Image (tube, grey):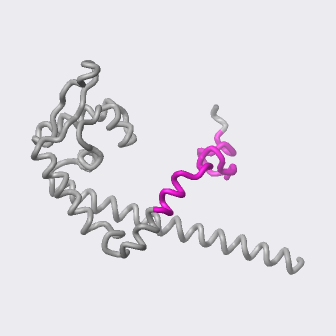
Amino acid sequence: MSIGARETGKAQADASALNRDILDALTDLVKRAGAISHSIAAGFGVAPSDLLALFKLDGVLPMKELAQRMGCDASFVTVIADTLERQGLARREPSQRDRRVKNLVLTPAGIAAKERLMRELATRMPWCYGLDDTERQCFLSLLRKMLNSPGGDDHAPESGLPGTAATDRSG
């Protein structure tokens, strides 16, 4: 094996190890954030999905748009709206433009709960206490760059893992 081939092989192994380390750290961060979210939701007496809705609600928001922001089915938002209404945190009202559309609106208690939620998140999420302002801004920029970059599932090479195009021959 030539020196160039060995160096290329080592660089690929280093990149692979780095990608594994990133995935491992990211998985740990997501698990920690999820645990914190569950704990905060329990403190509010709601499910984590209800807490996410509270976080995503700004002013008057059509329920269909809330579903898009949450990445869930619109029918699930109906269940969330029921819970938020029972808790006195939000109310449904018809849209002024299209009476068939239902908006979800935070009540004064919902606004206060959202403010409390934001304070909880600001003190308990790892990036809030583990990074300074400059590092958080950089972290946000990197997250947005990754989320907005072309590629993803549509451009990933076939890996041969279960459920991927290389092995899934069910279709």
Q: Whole-percent x and y of residue 70?
A: 35, 43
Work out whether residue 132 or residue 42 is closer to the camera in this orientation and state it: 132
Work out whether residue 69 or residue 76 is closer to the camera in this orientation and state it: 69
The quarter of the rendered structure image containing the N terminus is bottom right
Q: Residue at x 19, y 37 (%)?
A: 105
The quarter of the rendered structure image containing the C terminus is top right
Q: Residue at x 69, y 51 (%)?
A: 157
Q: Residue at x 15, y 34 (%)?
A: 91
- Residue sticking out furthest to the bottom: 3
Residue 152 part of the magenta segment: yes
Q: Whole-percent x and y of residue 154?
A: 63, 44
Quadrant of the rendered image containing residue 30: bottom left
> Relative to residue 95, is residue 136 depicted above or below?
below
> Relative to residue 79, is residue 99 depicted above or below?
above
- Residue sticking out furthest to the front: 97
Q: Whole-percent x and y of residue 107?
A: 13, 41
**Magenta residue span:** 141-168
Residue 5 part of the magenta segment: no
Count of numbered circles in the view: 0
